């Protein structure tokens, strides 16, 4: 990477700075509690979680290319309806209540990824920092506030506050407009090649792919769009 022209480090939120899986689990359990609290037939957690993962896997093919293009709350309702359709269980009038419980659970269950605060402390005096994230405004802002990291960022772009959703490059163009910088002045850090790294790279940003598993760190997929691949946020302190 050429850091000479870089003035901005732009971060994804879910799965990059915050633990998306932990928040998702808490949110799903909260949503299931809503259903089980009013239903004659309750659903075990493992059955509900497996059905949810099946919905996520089924939508991955198209969501990777086009994103969701609908508000996050509406998307949650859609997913829960698909779960009940797959299980053959009438959900009753609780889908929106479940969607709201999921959002609150995502906030309460969120925790920072290992090294996130230390990296932000290190970078904040060297670069302008920003966030570009998919999701509902209330959920994403409350995550940032709950973890006490919103003050690090000069710009926070949340898809729910715009007409665009990841991976639409217009969402990234909007972030550049807010920051008033050219793409070559930005490094994008994210954990999804399809939503974070690919659109940023195609616009001319430098890119760092966070692959903590690591699943794609040795694959050709990563090298197509990522200038650098890391498995831990702390590695940024020796790179930037």
Image (cartoon, rainbow, N blue to C red):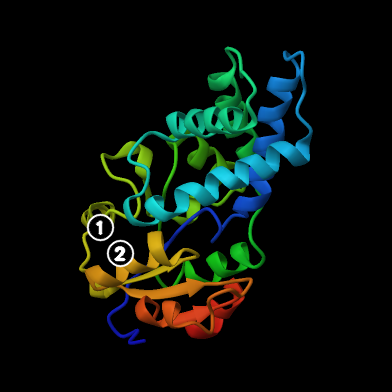
Crowd class of label 1 (few under 14; some 14 to 19; many from 20; radius 10 Å): some
Q: Is residue 14 visible?
A: yes
Q: Is residue 111 left or right of residue 227?
A: right
Q: Is residue 21 left or right of residue 159?
A: right
- In the orientation shown, which residue stands out farthest toward the front? 88
**Residue at mark 1:** 169
**Residue at mark 2:** 199
- The disc at residue 200 is none
Counting from the top left corner in percent of width and height, residue 158 is at 38, 44
Q: Establish if 27 lies above or below 3.
A: above
Counting from the top left corner in percent of width and height, residue 163 is at 26, 39
When asked about the image quadrant of residue 226, the answer is: bottom left
Q: Is residue 129 visible?
A: no
Q: Is residue 129 left or right of residue 93?
A: left
Q: Judge by depth and name the residue closer to the eye, 209 or 236.
A: 209
Q: Residue at x 49, y 71 (%)?
A: 123
Q: Judge by depth and name the residue closer to the eye, 206 or 223.
A: 223
Q: Residue at x 29, y 40 (%)?
A: 162
Q: Secondary structure at mark 2?
A: helix
Give yes or no for contact between labels 2 and 1 (Cβ–Cβ under 8 Å).
yes
Q: Residue at x 49, y 80 (%)?
A: 229
First of labels 2, 1 by sequence position: 1
Counting from the top left corner in percent of width and height, residue 62 is at 38, 51
Counting from the top left corner in percent of width and height, residue 184 is at 24, 75
Q: Is residue 104 left or right of residue 220?
A: right
Q: Establish if 139 lies above or below 151.
A: above
Q: Residue at x 21, y 59 (%)?
A: 180
């Amino acid at each position: 990477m050429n850091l000479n022209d870089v003035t901005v480090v732009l971060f994804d939120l879910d799965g990059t700075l915050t633990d998306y899986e932990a928040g998702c689990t808490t949110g799903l359990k909260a949503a299931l509690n809503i259903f089980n609290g009013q239903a004659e037939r309750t659903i075990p957690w493992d059955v509900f979680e497996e059905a949810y993962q099946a919905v996520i896997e089924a939508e991955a093919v198209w969501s990777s290319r086009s994103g969701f293009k609908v508000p996050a709350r509406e998307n949650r309702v859609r997913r829960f309806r698909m779960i009940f359709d797959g299980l053959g269980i009438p959900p009753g009038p609780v889908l929106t209540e479940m969607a709201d419980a999921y959002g609150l659970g995502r906030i309460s269950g969120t925790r920072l990824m290992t090294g996130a605060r230390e990296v932000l402390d290190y970078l904040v005096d060297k670069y302008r920092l920003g966030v570009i994230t998919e999701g509902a405004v209330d959920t994403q802002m409350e995550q940032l506030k709950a973890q006490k990291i919103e003050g690090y960022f000069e710009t926070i772009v949340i898809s729910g506050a715009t007409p665009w959703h990841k991976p639409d490059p217009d969402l990234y163009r909007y972030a550049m407009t807010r920051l008033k910088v050219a793409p070559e002045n930005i490094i994008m850090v994210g954990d999804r090649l399809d939503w974070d790294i690919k659109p940023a790279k195609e616009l001319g940003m430098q890119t760092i792919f966070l692959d903590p598993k690591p699943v794609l760190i040795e694959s050709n997929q990563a090298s197509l769009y990522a200038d650098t691949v890391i498995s831990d946020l702390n590695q940024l302190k020796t790179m930037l």
